[in-house]
Amino acid sequence: MGHSVRDKQEAEEHDISRAISFHQNGDEIPSVYKVGLPPKRKLMSEFTSTVKETFFADNPFRHFKDQSKSKKLILGSQALFPILEWGRYYSLSKFKGDLIAGLTIASLCIPQDIGYAKLANLDPQYGLYSSFVPPLVYAFMGSSRDIAIGPVAVVSLILGTLLQNEVDPVHNAAEYRRLAFTATFFAGVTQAALGFLRLGFLIDFLSHAAIVGFMGGAAITIALQQLKGLLGVIKFTKKTDIISVMHSVWGNVHHGWNWQTVVLGSVFLAFLLLARYIGKKKKSLFWVSAIAPLISVILSTLFVYLTRVDKDGVQIVKKIRRGINPPSAHKIYFSGPNVAKGFKIGVIAGMIGLTEAIAIGRTFASMKDYHLDGNKEMLALGVMNLTGSLTSCYVATGSFSRSAVNYMAGCQTAVSNIVMSIVVLLTLEVITPLFYYTPNAILAAIIISAVLGLIDYEAALLIWKIDKLDFVACMGAFIGVVFSSVEIGLLIAISLSFAKILLHVTRPHTALLGNIPRTSIYRNIEQYPEATKVPGMLILRVDSAIYFSNSNYIRERILRWLSDETQELDRKGLPRIQFLVVDMSPVINIDTSGIHALEELHSSLQKRDIQLALANPGQHVIDKLHASKITDTIGPDNIFLTVAEAVQTFSPKATVEV
Amino acid sequence: MGHSVRDKQEAEEHDISRAISFHQNGDEIPSVYKVGLPPKRKLMSEFTSTVKETFFADNPFRHFKDQSKSKKLILGSQALFPILEWGRYYSLSKFKGDLIAGLTIASLCIPQDIGYAKLANLDPQYGLYSSFVPPLVYAFMGSSRDIAIGPVAVVSLILGTLLQNEVDPVHNAAEYRRLAFTATFFAGVTQAALGFLRLGFLIDFLSHAAIVGFMGGAAITIALQQLKGLLGVIKFTKKTDIISVMHSVWGNVHHGWNWQTVVLGSVFLAFLLLARYIGKKKKSLFWVSAIAPLISVILSTLFVYLTRVDKDGVQIVKKIRRGINPPSAHKIYFSGPNVAKGFKIGVIAGMIGLTEAIAIGRTFASMKDYHLDGNKEMLALGVMNLTGSLTSCYVATGSFSRSAVNYMAGCQTAVSNIVMSIVVLLTLEVITPLFYYTPNAILAAIIISAVLGLIDYEAALLIWKIDKLDFVACMGAFIGVVFSSVEIGLLIAISLSFAKILLHVTRPHTALLGNIPRTSIYRNIEQYPEATKVPGMLILRVDSAIYFSNSNYIRERILRWLSDETQELDRKGLPRIQFLVVDMSPVINIDTSGIHALEELHSSLQKRDIQLALANPGQHVIDKLHASKITDTIGPDNIFLTVAEAVQTFSPKATVEV
């Protein structure tokens, strides 16, 4: 290995074996590289940095530093109302995009809103109300440019099922509505509080896999619920699980189905699905699927008006209250047993709404590469729902289907939400009477075609390919929702997600390392079968932080590796193991139980006359090893920068005495 | 660096820069070392290996492999009854040790049992019963050689407080006892089930720190409870928190205290504490502290018998039922509302008992270096308590104080438990009437001096030094027990332990790496301040598995490192960053959310014209990267074996274009 083959870069990059060779030749340069012990941090500074990293990871106040008071006020207002920031750069060309997008999502949202309100067991106008006030509030406070705000299927379903467990929506309609507003109020409070207290990371605890399963299950549940409207069944179960619903559907097949409704519904469902297919096949024709629901509503309403099939039992929307949102602050329960109920339901609906909105917001932010502040976004959604609860709205959030249409229609800013909001306002003031003859079956068909987009079987397939445990969480959530209820599905999703983390922390992976030929690198023998073991030594890597929940397991697992290896060496008549090197690179942290386990491991090894050595302990680990004085027990000379150094130091001794 | 300085070991250990230098010189040997992709495992084999590692990590059936049927039967019996195994090698010299140890712990356990039964609101004989049957069962089935079985303070307290929440122990004594046996039955079922289902790892979820805090708090609670007996107070609170107890104590100071009791109790407490101090100071005098309680009982009983101070209000034990355990199977509730209550209490008491016994067992097993099978141990403890519940015993487990005495008295096997059991049998049959005049104050003093050993302030100090978050869990448990109740303390202990794990998984550490001078090693700049950054490159290390709960944070954190670095470089007028290398060594695993985050990171970087590279992805990670095809997105050439290789490959490009 002459100097000639080395070039400029290499000259700077000497290798570790050189440092060691100096050592073995008694050269003056310090032999084995010392493992760094960072300067001890003060308790307070450690505490503040942990708090900062947990709650203020994004350092929201960095812009405020070293600014004048008036500048701080401006920055503060801009932080709270991003419209003050991006509004300054707003232009006519941007407005053109927003106008078209806004009109498109308005045409989509009006029929959807009426249907979703039914899912929440509310009168149709409440769906429209929720597409008027919340999008306006969001446009001023939100930072996503692509999200379309309004009532969504899953939240409507959750709200509907949870509320009807408490109050009967038919016989106690007034109390039901009041509880709905109370729940909306607390949903808003929850969302705003999470944002304000910077607890946004809590929604990350619902894993992607769990969301995919949960959404798919909710979509199927919602579609099944629509069979009531699509088949014209009058007596229908209130339960949402597939078995009860199928029972209702087939139990009514002889008397309960209304054939005119079935025909009408099927024709328009076919039309909607075709439009959806076209929109999916050719991205430039996305507007076909966006406009199809409104066309269905217009055509079917005209048809019923002309043929008066409603007299034959085709159910229609009938009266929708005209005019904009009435105030509802006085309807919210602030005392009595309904507060607790409303709070519980509000927290669940608020969290689900948040999860959906943040997921959408992040997706589009990453597609257009702008930054979305999760905590700020939650505050915006919270204030939006709080305002909504005072103006007869129920929980609104970002809609998957409408946000996608918004994006494809070329929206530029949240102004598209304002445009949509104005169209809904006009609808409420002017054209609600026109919906009188709209058949319920068409609304059912619109909802079915909308929620089909939530069933992301491609994502489920990918999850299956990548991570089987994730798939279990995904299917658990799906099956829970479909066969039991939304709450059970949610519970399963969250429990399985956590169980997975805990499983990894409780039974971490350990690997046997070997030397990769012609290098001083040591890697997992399973991953690199060409890697060779070092005689007289056992080199292991622990692939996890060492915590109370795994410290005993890790200690026992290491001893098991040792006894397995010893047996094999005995059988082959090879020299026994004298050194056990634990590669600590992936050991991010260690706690007191972990330290105990290391101490016990060390004393077990001493009794077997085997020397324990640690390689590459990280910052936190070496800190704690020192604090606990276990470095002295193991011997400071047995803690190395790399596995290679440990091997270099030990191999002469290991080979001498056989 | 001539060949002369290299010795035999080094010749085998070429360095990585060599492999790279070949590459740069167009040599034929493959340049950059490929990251190993282990052969794809079948789903079933992956599943079975996960299950095996989780539940059968210790491979309990390995001895059964390739054995004849009769041999299997013998091995099976030996596995269930370890006495069949070690009994064959039992000798007279071992028996000598066991006899002395057994007699010593018997002298200690008899007064303790009577006191502990009072803590559980049961008559004194039930404490003795629980020191007769359970130790016998354990001796046949248990595998610890040092544990001393019987009633213990903390479990007695928990059982007492939980049971009296349900049934009044004074006015409903019969029902109370029945519920106690029911709880004991379910405690046994829980323990045996955990062992049989191999869920033993569940008790690891109570961290060492939490146990230290919990035990300390329980000890203080128990000691405070003893003030009733020590001061002769008759009207005493049933609550266990320090404020209620202090209220009871000082509220009764003028009328409630009995001065004769106070004097008697204080004198013997002083004697016991002195004996304890002597035993601690000089290990060879441990028997002084072991024998002191029995001496106190004898002396104080004699004193009361002679002086008849019981007539002046000194409370005494009075009658203890003579004879061995009556059967109690018919007293266990198997129907009615008391089943659920007994079950709940049994599960809690059983888990606490298990935690204590396993902690003790492990401590001594590691001191004498023998293996303790946690799951088998649980089965033994479970069967022991099951049997106990049928023979009028309440929950027994391993006692800290008596096990330590057992060990120091030179016990060799579980035979010392049999000796103790026989002594208790004789006590029950012959000498219980002698306890008639034993003053309660002496029992209180004995309990106080016993539980003081549970307050391990040295361990708490060490925890403070090593890990501040552990200390928070420790103090949380302590304060919860002392100021509220045992259940609250337990809840706090478990919640804080989990919160800690989740915090680490939610906000993992990331580090900026630099090159350690004269090596090709890259390490955390904070830990190794001498490490230098590589121009044009940002090298980061993610110190955690990338899961749903942290994937967004990690992506954002990496982008923040990037923008911070870019700002600094801009200010200094240095070349911009063109390559971002993420060291994946500590990234043990990745899930679908993690893959998404990487994809988003990659696309964000592309928009900034920065190349993403990954170094040293592990077995599971590379597997999932391939499955998700993200390797193609990032480019297979941008995934390296080490950071050094990535730097070697990129640095020419990075320095050329400035």
Image: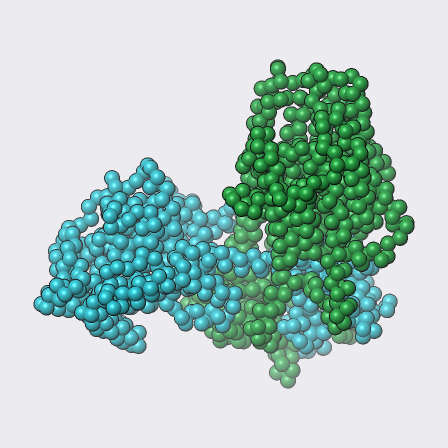
Chain colours: A cyan, B green
Question: Farthest residue in the left direction?
Answer: A306
Taking the image as shown, residue A229 lies to the left or right of residue A307, namely right
Closest to the observer: B162 or A41?
B162
Q: Residue at x 72, y 77 (%)?
A: A1
Question: Which quadrant of the view contains residue B463?
Answer: top right
Quick check: A413 above or below B188?
below
Question: Which quadrant of the view contains residue B201?
Answer: bottom right
Q: Residue at x 42, y 58 (%)?
A: A489
Taking the image as shown, residue A450 lies to the left or right of residue B462, namely left
Q: Is residue B253 visible?
A: yes
Image quadrant occupied by the C terminus of chain A: bottom right
Quick check: B438 above or below A228?
above
The x and y percentages for residue B49 are: 62, 68
Question: Farthest residue in the bottom direction?
Answer: B28
The x and y percentages for residue B650 are: 55, 72
Taking the image as shown, residue B555 lies to the left or right of residue A226, namely right
The x and y percentages for residue A432 are: 14, 57
Question: Which quadrant of the view contains residue A277?
Answer: bottom left
Quick check: B98 above or below A657?
above
The x and y percentages for residue B538 are: 53, 63
